[in-house]
Image: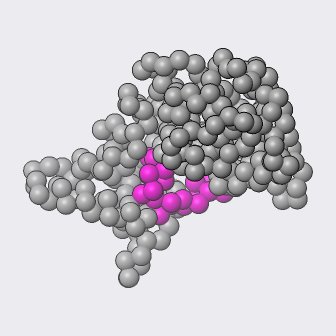
């Protein structure tokens, strides 16, 4: 996190820590009250809250009608209280330091090249938009195992069908699908964009048929940030020889036009439902 974002994160954690019962248990603070207590603008508070939630330092509840905030209420987690105490202890050891500038333990890095406040704002906006499901695809751009263009078309159609099936259910939430393939190539600016798109996603699909190292790095970013991951591969291709192989895999044929599991379609519908309900 940048210095300004880190300062704001400390301010928010400090404000949340004051909301507790006589036994020291945290209880939620409404977004409007938190904004008033911290004097942070809604956009800034949304960004900081997203980072704290993604880092496990806070948890929020989201519902419709909380605009301009991306959440209705938020509270400190036990980990958040512990990390705040660690940050404050560091200041007490150096009394000349300003408590508002205390450094929080680092959250998982967005990119090895570092994220700017603008990057985090984009992530926060995507995560907080409950009217849009963000799905990204990581894959090798030229492969002997599939036709790249057809793979993208088939997977997007698969998710469009899953969204339609879910929204046909009584009480389903209404939202649009934003499906995009991750950018090609690597370099400082481009990898930041790739990492940002992954962290902002609700579901990330990775085709590992070629055991492509770049795809494995991208999947690692998704798993580190708790993004819902769907690894896929052409039937007959080997699983990666690593801990990632513990993920549930979906085998396909004909450039992902057909999946081996007869229940695959319903599983994707359930994945879509869980992902969108998590957003509120």
Q: Is residue 266 above or below residue 254?
A: below
The quadrant in which residue 64 appears is bottom right
The quadrant in which residue 229 appears is top right
Is residue 176 part of the magenta span, yes or no? no
Is residue 69 part of the magenta span, yes or no? yes
Residue at position x 30%, y 50% in the image = 105
In this orientation, does residue 116 appear? yes
Name the residue furthest bottom.
22
Task: Name the spot of residue 120 as percent of width and height, x first.
Answer: 47, 36
Where the N terminus falls, by quadrant? top left
Residue at position x 67%, y 20% in the image = 143
Q: Is residue 84 above or below residue 39?
A: below
Quick one: 195 or 205, which is closer to the camera? Answer: 205
Q: Is residue 85 above or below residue 23?
A: above
Residue at position x 40%, y 39% in the image = 109
Please provide the residue range marked out in magenta: 48-75
Task: Name the spot of residue 167 as percent of width and height, x first.
Answer: 85, 49
Quick one: 58 or 157, which is closer to the camera? Answer: 157
């Amino acid at each position: 996190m940048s210095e300004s974002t880190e300062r704001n994160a400390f301010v928010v954690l400090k404000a949340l820590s004051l909301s507790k019962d006589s036994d020291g248990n945290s209880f939620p603070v409404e977004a409007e009250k938190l904004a008033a207590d911290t004097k942070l603008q809604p956009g800034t508070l949304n960004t900081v809250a997203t980072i704290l939630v993604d880092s496990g330092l806070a948890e929020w509840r989201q519902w419709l009608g909380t605009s301009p905030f991306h959440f209705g209420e938020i509270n400190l987690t036990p980990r958040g209280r512990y990390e705040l105490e660690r940050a404050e202890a560091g200041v007490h050891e150096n009394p000349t330091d300003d408590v508002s500038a205390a450094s929080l333990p680092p959250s998982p890095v967005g990119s090895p090249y570092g994220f700017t406040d603008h990057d985090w704002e984009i992530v926060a906006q995507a995560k907080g938009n409950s009217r849009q499901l963000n799905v990204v695809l990581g894959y090798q751009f030229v492969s002997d195992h599939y036709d790249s263009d057809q793979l993208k078309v088939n997977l997007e159609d698969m998710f469009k069908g899953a969204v339609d099936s879910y929204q046909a259910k009584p009480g389903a939430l209404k939202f649009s699908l934003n499906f995009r393939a991750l950018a090609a190539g690597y370099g400082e600016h481009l990898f930041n964009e790739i990492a940002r798109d992954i962290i902002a996603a609700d579901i990330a699909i990775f085709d590992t048929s070629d055991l492509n190292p770049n795809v494995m790095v991208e999947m690692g970013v998704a798993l580190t940030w708790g993004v819902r991951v769907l690894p896929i591969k052409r039937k007959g291709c080997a699983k990666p020889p690593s801990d990632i192989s513990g993920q549930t895999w979906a085998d396909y044929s004909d450039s992902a036009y057909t999946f081996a599991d007869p229940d695959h379609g319903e599983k994707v519908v359930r994945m879509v439902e869980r992902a969108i309900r998590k957003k509120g």
